[in-house]
Amino acid sequence: MKKVTILDIMKMKQEGGKIPVLTAYDYPTAKALDEAGIPVILVGDSAGMVFAGYKNTLSVTIDEMRYHTKAVARGSKNALIVTDMPFLSYQVSIEEAKRNSGLLVREGAEAVKLEGGLSMEDTISAIVDMDIPVMGHIGLTPQSVHRMGGYRVQGREKKQREKLLSDARAVEKAGAFCIVLEGMPADLAKEITETISIPTIGIGAGPYCDGQVLVINDVLGLYEDVQPRFIKRYANLKEIISSAVNEYAEEVREGKFPGKEHSF
Ligand code: KIV
């Protein structure tokens, strides 16, 4: 397998191949995804919820994202590593956005992702001008949970729909190589995908995007606090963990483990 670059991801849209993306926050998970041939690993700020147990992503700091990025970068050989810029790391000023995106790249990120469309056009463009590739993210943007009044599907009304189309065009114009479309009607995601030239990666945005992203803990059945309709669970690791630790505890209590073969 060869190292995946942003050029490969952009080419996949032109060639009509679908792009599977998954999140990872630690070394062993990144290694497993990389070895499975996942082309893009997103070090998402969803780490705040599914890894650290915060109730939303707003508490996540740039230092936490640096730590997760370092761990994922050590585990991944071929996948393109994209790290989320957390809340407050890019909204205050373009200078802060540039510095913080650079800090993530220093830890091993090969691109950064930030939320917002038209309002982030200049910020995206400034980061791209530093030669740091940017993945956009519009629609249901989790860092805007308070403005949205919860995690709600965006773009159902005409005005919102037009706004999201302009957001997508602004992200493309600013030089992003790719864009996440989250929590929007499938027909709107389809229209955006057909309108812009960069790949769209959907989550809760229907089947017509150029790719799909999911949070790894949702895929593996390791997070139950929030369960939106759009997730699909492919395994139930929580059950597997429970059964393994019960067996271990029972064997310790019964004096079956450790045995002679585990002793020196
Ligand atoms: O933080 C994250 O995991 C994300 C994806 C779900 C798109 O932003």
Image (tube, grey):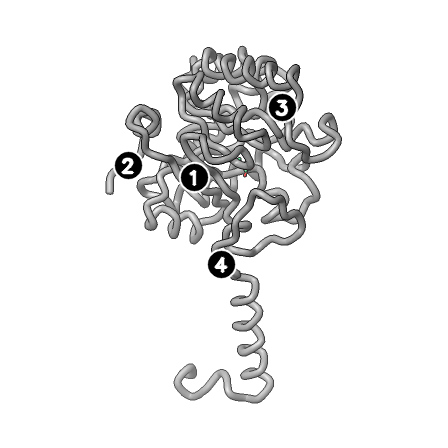
Dot 1 corresponds to which residue? Answer: 21
Q: Quadrant of ligand 1?
A: top right
Q: Which mark is residue 155?
A: 3
Name the spot of residue 210 as percent of width and height, x first.
Answer: 41, 30
Check if mark 4's residue and mark 2's residue have beta carbons within 8 Å.
Answer: no
Q: Is mark 1 within 8 Å of ligand 1?
A: yes
Name the residue at 59% across, 49% down: 51
Q: Nearer the viewer, residue 43 or 17?
A: 17
Under tag 1, what secondary structure? strand
Above or below — where is 92 with respect to 112? above
**Precedes in sequence: disc 4 or disc 2:** 2
Q: Disc 2 marks which residue?
A: 3
10 Å crowding of disc 2: few (<14), some (14-19), many (20+): few
Figure quadrant of residue 211: top left
Q: Which of pointers 4 and 2 indicates the residue nearer the eye?
A: 4
Q: Secondary structure at mark 2?
A: loop
Left of 245 or right of it: where is 54? Answer: right
The residue that mark 4 highlights is 235
Tell me the distance, in whole angstroms, between the alpha carbons under discs 3 and 2: 36 Å
